[in-house]
Image: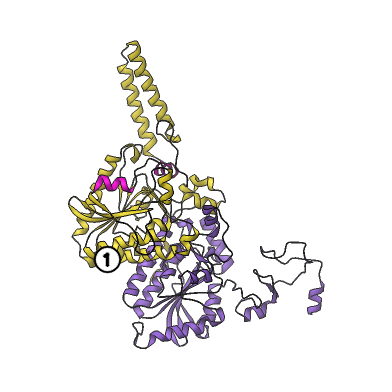
Amino acid sequence: MFKDLFQKKKYATVPSVSQAPAAGERPKREIPEGLMNRCPKCGNIQFSKEWEKNLKVCSTCGHHSRLNALERIAMTLDDGRFFETDADLTSEDPLEFPGYKAKLEQQKASSGLKDAVVTGEGEIGGIPVVIGVMSFDFFSGSMGSVVGEKVTRAIELAHEKKLPLLLFSTSGGARMQESILSLMQMAKTSAALAKFQEDGGLFISVFTDPTLGGVSASFASLGDYILAEPGAIVGFAGRIVIEQTIRQKLPDNFQTAEFNLKHGQLDKVVHRKDMKAFLTKLLEMHVAGGASDGQ
Amino acid sequence: MSQEVLQMDNKLPFEGPLSEQRRKIDHLKKVGVEQNIDFSDEIARLEEAYKKLEEEVYSNLSGAQIMHLARVHSRPTTLDYINEIFDDFIELHGDRLFGDDLAIVGGIAKLNGVPVTVLGHQRGKDTKDNIQRFFGSPHPEGFRKALRFMQQANKFGRPIITFIDTKGAYPGDSAEARGQSEAIARNLKEMALLRVPVICVVIGEGGSGGALALGVGNRVLMLENAIYSVISPNGAASILWKDASKADQAAEAMKITAKDLKAFGIIEEIVPEPKGGAHLDPATTAEAVKTAIWRHLDELSAMTPEALVEDRYRKFRSVGKFAAPELV
């Protein structure tokens, strides 16, 4: 079966990616959709099943591919058991922004999600937590009123139940189509965190690739502990805007998790396969007698 | 970081008909003097028409036109308002961590005899000034400087007045390395906890997180021709339509004017400007700003620290428009 696969050299449709070899350099091959996965970073081709078993991390270069919120939840919570909250909040078009409604519908269809964050409750290593996970595949993870509201409600739920709060972020920034209402979600989520954290609440923030703009510059940067996946791009302004401003090429590692670690912006870079164990260990530090101990 | 270039007579392109009318009047006056003819009836008629035209041009400005007014180079800056409105201003410097970002200015001063902390984004007055002030776009040390001033005010029980006037936080590599995101986020969080009255006034451009980092107030006021948005219209145009020149279109779509924001409940009050914009009469504009600040401060001063925190929290907690199923 494999032999057949690699012999069909003439009909090439491996998706081209910036780091991949230029077209024509290598004979192309046709691969049945979904069977194989090509790493967007190193170009390594791997069986999808193996890659998925590897939590969508490239076995060659360690590149962490972006995850959908539901995939992330499944691999983070005990037995994937998850009780979703505020599942029915959906975006409106308060500015009557040209094309916004249609784009929302299209994003819902393509991602299977209702907006860019999924929130709820579950357990990690037997410790109950409130969890929120953003999804880049919905509208580039942009924060509009719904994301701001769901994150705020998650913070309030953790506060009310005295549970630790865990947020995995990924976002291109605030959602322009809701302009000022999006911007104010930064203040709203941060103010809710202020209350929660002043009251002793524990908030663990995890940056995943990429987290930029309004999400990075609000709740995601306010964790009592801030973690990131390897290679995740984290920053306020995007690389292109910065390059245009300073008229210089930026180094490859600019704004990576490792860059941010070096510059003191986060506590630890944690490999995806170690994330759950690390979170458990960190949460356990706070259970006995901690303010987050609900008992 | 372009600023709007005015025509010879201090007018923007959309103000053209006014310039034309003014030229006619001036010409007639000149001819009258030169040839010793009495045109006073004619001149009075033209002045009347000018007023009407003025009403027409300014009463229904589009978002894009207001954006151009907000960006007029000679528009008063934070320091202009500080000098006009407050007495005994003592400028303070530095974040005590890294440096002194001149894109933020601030210190302590008296407002009608009451000591307050006052701060804001500071654009440059000329190219050289703009370069050292990064066109009013702060680095992390600027936001941390602002936070230091605000927490000092909190300690000494002084009300805080902030002036917002920035295209956004500075998009630079060193700003990122020093934690631009963290600096903005921390200001949002810490401003929410301030136990003194906080009044914010958007005087020019309120762009993105860099504006909001000085904007978590009990009251947010906006000058009539100021704008406030999640990203500069130019930025939005280049992201949405890959064409920064469509900024006018983005300005309309994003609903960035004081009127829009008042309708969304984001701001409490629109402070009127003289016809044609604040730059034509800074002193009158400052007087109107002062009156508004004082009135709000008077209301807020009656509140306890706890009530102030709660009031500010409720204001921001309630922002957002979304569809939710009926609660059971």
The quadrant in which residue B50 appears is top left
Q: Does the magenta stretch include residue B78?
A: yes
Residue placed most toward the observer, A177 or A165: A165
Quarter of the image where the C terminus of chain A is located: bottom left
Give the amino acid at mark 1. Answer: Val
A168 left or right of B151?
right
Residue stretch rendered in magenta on the structure: B61-86
Q: In this view, does B255 lie above or below B309?
A: above
The quadrant in which residue A136 appears is bottom right
Query: Residue A270: image x %, image y %?
Result: 52, 78
Mostly what secondary structure, the magenta segment? helix
Residue placed most toward the observer, A217 or A169: A217
Quarter of the image where the N terminus of chain A is located: bottom right
Instruction: Work out whether residue B75 can be spotted.
Output: yes
Query: Circle 1 is placed at which residue position?
Result: B309
Residue name at image x 69 percent, y 76 percent = A46
Residue placed most toward the observer, A217 or A239: A239
Residue placed most toward the observer, B116 or B50: B116
Q: Is residue B34 above or below residue B165?
A: above
Query: Residue A159: image x %, image y %?
Result: 35, 76
Q: Does the magenta stretch include residue A251?
A: no
Write down which chain is painted yellow.
B
Query: Residue A255: image x %, image y %?
Result: 52, 65
Instruction: Work out whether residue A169 can be spotted.
Output: no
Number of numbered discs overlaid on the protein picture:
1
Which chain does tag 1 point to?
B
The quadrant in which residue A190 appears is bottom left
SS label for mark 1: helix
A163 left or right of B244?
left
Q: How crowded is mark 1: few (under 14 residues within 10 Å), some or many (20 or more)?
A: many
Write down which chain is painted purple.
A
